[in-house]
Image (cartoon, rainbow, N blue to C red):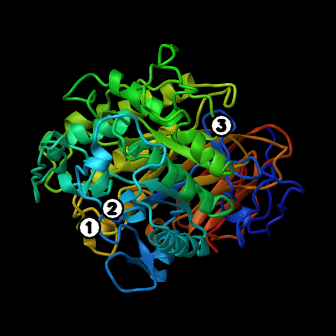
């Protein structure tokens, strides 16, 4: 391999290609391909998301989910759920370029009917007219506030994944999600345990599984699943042309009758897959056998409803709740475009609102890595004609802890598997099912230690195929290699966390490529050699020494 030495610190030379790969949606205003990925993102098949120029995308970010009234993050005020310019600017400076932004069904469609309303919860074939709980004025006000939050994030170059969040189905069970009118317990009175170290105890409380199963089987006259799909279609239609939204997470951590401790997961996963696909085009299980759907499920499922309302964005679908900790996912191929396999990674020993047990650091490492291995294998296995090389995967939750060693393990696993992620979560919300101690804002001594791991050097947009990635948060040493694609005119971009790891500058070297960004830039740009080639990039703290065999850029 011939490596040409170029004088450090030369100006950028890349230009946008004359035609982007995604003709349907304009690029975000102000987005610069020299600073990272430019949406809309695509999932044509294979392990990586791609930006509008065909670059492989690895994003790092955080969750923003507010689970109590008014059930969303807002801007322009001073309440605990208000996001400020200073916070978003801080996110961007740390290298976070994506937020998983929560929405709650109860906020979108609170309705007026009570739990177990007979006009809704009576068993029987679902009425096509639905439950009659939608209020356009309430919905539109909620969406208007959501639009403002997406816009604020976009102003600082941060994309949004819109996440329909729930835990333990509804706040009547000590969780959040469904409005009261969508809770059908067959008359059982919920008795949630509140202020407990681990909120998941309420998943085994009275009435929870009954309420979930009326939803998954859609077997009450109120047409719960059909109404949920309709609300989602309205949300997706609103963001159809929004360049700062990259996709949708349809349902957080699905749970139901077949999930442990109530079964082995396979029967529930069939219900879940039918929820995603609909009865007219059910998917396949992991054995590639056609799944059998509940009789009253909608013919057109949630994924095609969303894709019809918005064909421009991705769908980050999840397996059942227990796959977060290692049990297998039985959902198989679903014949729709734009799919991303979305997963979480939490060791089963994790205590969200208490100290981690003494065995945490010895029991959890292999289990956390197993979650990556299983989901990447599933993503490869679930190839379809729409995505013939399989699906990309994305880690939308991990953390919820101040255990820095755990954060370092999971982010290292993500690097080794070349997976993007969003940490749980940014703000220190006192919500019913989160972690009360794991927020990254406001700044404090614990958050500084956590950010020393979470604010990383990483390749956000790669003009070719990523091959290997490693970042050492203790030393700040970063290594990355990729196979360049000469058809991509835009540079490979590495985010360099100046404030957390390189306050005195950095030395960047590359073999096989050419550094085109200014010395000391927060965004390190590397141009390929104009032909397919192996390119490697190294970043270390401090100034550069002599490096006769590689292109270099000093700290400036």
In the figure, is residue 186 to the left or right of 17?
left
* Residue 468 visible to the viewer: no
Q: Nearer the viewer, residue 22 or 168?
A: 168
Label 3 – label 1 distance at C-alpha: 42 Å
The residue at which mark 1 appears reads as 446
Q: Residue at x 52, y 32 (%)?
A: 278
Of the residues under marks 3 and 2, which one precedes in the sequence? Answer: 3
Looking at the picture, how far across and down is residue 556, in whole percent?
Answer: 64, 75
Q: Are marks 1 and 2 in contact (CB under 8 Å)?
A: yes
Above-or-below relation of 344 to 281: below
The reply to whether dot 3 and dot 2 touch (C-beta < 8 Å) is no
Which of pointers 3 and 1 lies earlier in the amino acid sequence?
3
Secondary structure beneath label 3: loop
Between 189 and 209, the residue placed more toward the observer is: 189
Q: Quadrant of the N terminus?
A: top right
In the picture, the disc for residue 182 is none
Mark pair 3, 2: CA separation: 37 Å
Q: Which numbered disc covers residue 337?
A: 3
Residue 466 showing in the rendered view? yes
Q: Residue at x 41, y 71 (%)?
A: 73
């Amino acid at each position: 391999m011939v490596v040409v030495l170029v004088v450090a610190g030369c100006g950028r030379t890349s230009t946008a290609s004359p035609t982007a790969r995604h003709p349907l949606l304009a690029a975000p205003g102000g987005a610069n391909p020299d600073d990272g990925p430019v949406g809309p993102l695509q999932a044509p098949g294979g392990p990586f998301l791609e930006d509008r120029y065909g670059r492989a995308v690895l994003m790092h970010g955080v969750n923003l989910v507010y689970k109590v009234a008014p059930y969303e993050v807002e801007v322009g005020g001073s309440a605990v759920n208000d996001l400020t310019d200073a916070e978003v600017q801080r996110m961007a400076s740390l290298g976070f370029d994506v937020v998983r932004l929560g929405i709650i069904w109860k906020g979108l469609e609170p309705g007026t009917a009570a739990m177990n309303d007979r006009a809704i919860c009576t068993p029987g074939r679902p009425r096509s007219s639905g439950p009659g709980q939608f209020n356009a004025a309430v919905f539109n006000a909620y969406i208007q506030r959501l639009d403002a939050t997406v816009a604020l994030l976009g102003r600082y170059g941060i994309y949004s994944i819109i996440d329909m969040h729930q835990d333990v189905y509804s706040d009547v069970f000590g969780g959040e999600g469904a409005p009261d009118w969508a809770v059908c317990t067959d008359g059982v009175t919920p008795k949630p345990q509140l202020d407990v170290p681990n909120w998941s105890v309420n998943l085994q409380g009275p009435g929870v599984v009954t309420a979930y199963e009326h939803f998954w089987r859609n077997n009450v006259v109120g047409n719960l699943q059909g109404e949920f799909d309709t609300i989602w279609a309205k949300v997706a239609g609103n963001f159809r042309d929004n360049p700062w939204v990259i996709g949708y997470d349809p349902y957080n951590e699905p749970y139901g009758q077949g999930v442990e401790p109530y079964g082995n997961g396979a029967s529930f996963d069939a219900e879940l897959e039918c929820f995603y696909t609909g009865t007219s085009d059910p998917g396949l299980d992991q054995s590639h056998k056609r799944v059998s759907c509940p009789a009253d499920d909608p013919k057109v499922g949630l994924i095609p409803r969303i894709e019809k309302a918005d064909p421009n964005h991705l769908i980050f679908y999840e397996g059942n709740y227990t796959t977060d900790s290692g049990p297998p996912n039985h959902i198989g191929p679903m014949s729709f475009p734009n799919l991303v396999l979305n997963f979480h990674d939490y060791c089963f020993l994790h205590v969200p609102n208490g100290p981690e047990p003494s065995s945490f650091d010895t029991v959890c490492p292999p289990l956390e890595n197993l979650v990556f291995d299983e989901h990447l294998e599933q993503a490869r296995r679930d190839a379809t004609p729409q995505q013939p090389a399989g699906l990309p995967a994305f880690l939308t939750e991990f953390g919820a802890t101040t255990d820095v060693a755990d954060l370092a393990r999971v982010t290292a696993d993500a690097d080794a598997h070349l997976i993007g992620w969003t940490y749980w979560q940014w703000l220190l919300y006192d919500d019913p099912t989160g972690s009360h101690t794991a927020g990254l804002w406001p700044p404090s001594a614990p958050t500084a230690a956590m950010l020393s791991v979470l604010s990383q050097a990483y390749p956000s947009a790669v003009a070719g195929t990523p091959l290997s990635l490693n970042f050492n948060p203790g030393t700040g040493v970063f290594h990355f290699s990729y196979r360049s694609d000469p058809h991509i005119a835009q540079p490979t971009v590495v985010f360099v966390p100046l404030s957390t790891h390189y306050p005195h500058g950095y030395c960047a070297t590359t073999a096989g490529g050419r550094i085109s960004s200014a010395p000391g830039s927060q965004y390190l740009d590397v141009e390929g050699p104009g032909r397919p080639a192996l390119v490697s990039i190294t970043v270390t703290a401090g100034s550069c020494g002599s490096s006769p065999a590689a292109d270099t850029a000093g700290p400036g």
